Image (spheres, rainbow, N blue to C red):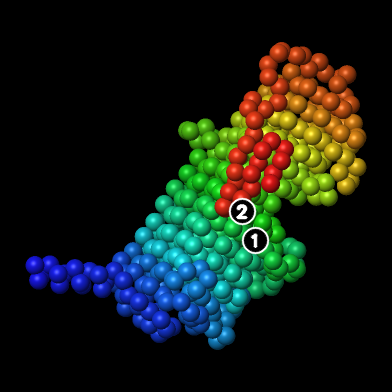
Amino acid sequence: MKAFSLLSAIAAYTAAQNVSTVDQLYSAVDNGSEGVTIEVAAGTYELTKTLQLKSGMTIVGAGMEKTILTNAPSWKPSTEMLPDKELERESVDQTAYMFVVSADDITISDLVVKAPDLHGAVFGMNMAGLTIRNVRIEEVLYSGIRTFGMKGCNITDNDFIDAGGRWQDGERGRIGNGQGMSGGAIYATWFSDCDISNNVMSATKTGDGHDHYGIKGRQAVNVRIHHNSIRTTGFSIELPFELDEDNEIDHNVLEGTVSIPKYEGGPVPESGVTFHIHHNYFGTTSPDGIELVRNGVEVDHNLFDIPLDKDHGHILGGHGQTTAQGPFSFHDNLVSNPAHSLLYASDGLENVSFYNNEVIANPGSQNLKDGLFNFGKDSDLSTIEIRNNIIECVGNRRPLGRNDKDRTVVIENNKLVGVSDTDKYENPQTGEKQGLTEPLKFKCGAYEELQVDGWNAT
């Protein structure tokens, strides 16, 4: 019995170490064993170098408002390596992050990282099982969390405030002035089987260097991004160019573009899905609500609620010169104020379905009269369908298509009000249900703070 008690005591000591000074924190991390829990007492800790965490370590503070880690004035790394080269982890200055994670099953929770002179809060590479929970990341220069090769990780219930920045591309070390490369509150290159949820991402600063994205990444596989409130100054979500598979974006409040373009739309995985985007609130079309082209995408049950004074861009925009074979479907969405168009593509499109949506098009601040659909010149129009929708143009009459070719797609069983070109296509009525197949009602955001009930969002 005594031997058992001694072993239990040793295990308890290994499992939890309490620290209340900077020196104790460094000692616990540097000398602690794998799997140790380090409990950091309330207080402000001015750190002078990176914390390199071991496998299974847990760093837990006394609470988001109570334990604050910041960089000491003497810790001010060079910015000459910003922006990093997004596909080259060797281009990252790891000494410029508060935590470095290169082992599995690490947890960081219940504290604040405020690091105005550091590139970011957490840098991770080739790890699995990372959990970052109930952490506020505030005022970093490039990316709050920057990772390469992240698998099976959970980033949940965090608060990102000004957790990123923009740096001049091609002139490393120079602050971006409206151009250049933006970091993200979360910037993940090659990540899979991850959950990113219940996070708030916001920006309070504007001007040179402060523009940044919410969630930015390259190649996401089986990643779910849900119940976040993203109100950064750049795109809300950017996942372009790579072989993405089986990703879900749902129940978010999105005040910026969701960007998912891929050359020729990219291959469609065995599951048939690259991105399923549903039950989100979209509050912008600048430059687009969703930037395309991408094959294997389904967009459904979202509210696009575009303010009349922010009516730039398009609900769906593709700006390349390739041909995407699809499939792409857009259905059961509500669109208030589609700005310049519901869908504008300079790319050729194939196998596109736009059905059972309801749209109210207002003139907006620009007195818009553009056609609501534009399909690239190399589109296979026989494979594109617009059916069972309710589309109402208020104020200005607007054509469905921007030119004659756009009116040769399959147009069927739509209720069109205030649409100016109805004499140029048949639009046969079939008796099928027009508009939403069921009422649109859901809660979204980090705290489900936004209730969508039809056209209303409160």
Q: Quadrant of residue 277?
A: top right
Query: What residue is pinned by disc 1?
Result: 202
Residue 3, given in percent of the width and then of the height, sits at 10, 70
Q: Quadrant of residue 116?
A: bottom right
Residue 22, given in percent of the width and then of the height, sits at 43, 83
As drawn, the label of residue 173 is: none
Task: Name the residue nearer the viewer: 334 or 75.
Answer: 334
Does residue 112 show up? no
Question: Count the marks: how many?
Answer: 2
Q: Is residue 94 above or below residue 134?
A: below
Marks 2/1: CA distance? 8 Å
Task: Name the residue nearer the viewer: 411 or 174.
Answer: 411
Quick one: label 1, few (<14), some, or many (20+) residues within 10 Å? many
Q: In the rendered view, does 124 fall on the left or right side of 6? A: right
Residue furthest bottom in the image? 74
The amino acid pointed to by label 1 is: Ser
Residue visible at 44% across and 71% down in the picture = 62
Residue 230, given in percent of the width and then of the height, sits at 63, 54
Query: What residue is pinned by disc 2?
Result: 229
Task: Name the residue nearer the viewer: 356 or 315.
Answer: 356
- Disc 2 secondary structure class: strand
Residue visible at 79% across and 47% down in the picture = 307
Where, quadrant-wise, is the N terminus in this rendering? bottom left
Residue visible at 47% across and 61% down in the picture = 133
- Disc 1 secondary structure class: strand
The amino acid pointed to by label 2 is: Ser
Residue 378, given in percent of the width and then of the height, sits at 73, 31
Does residue 114 show up? yes
Earlier sequence position, callout 2 versus callout 1: 1
Q: Dots 2 and 1: beta carbons under 8 Å?
A: yes
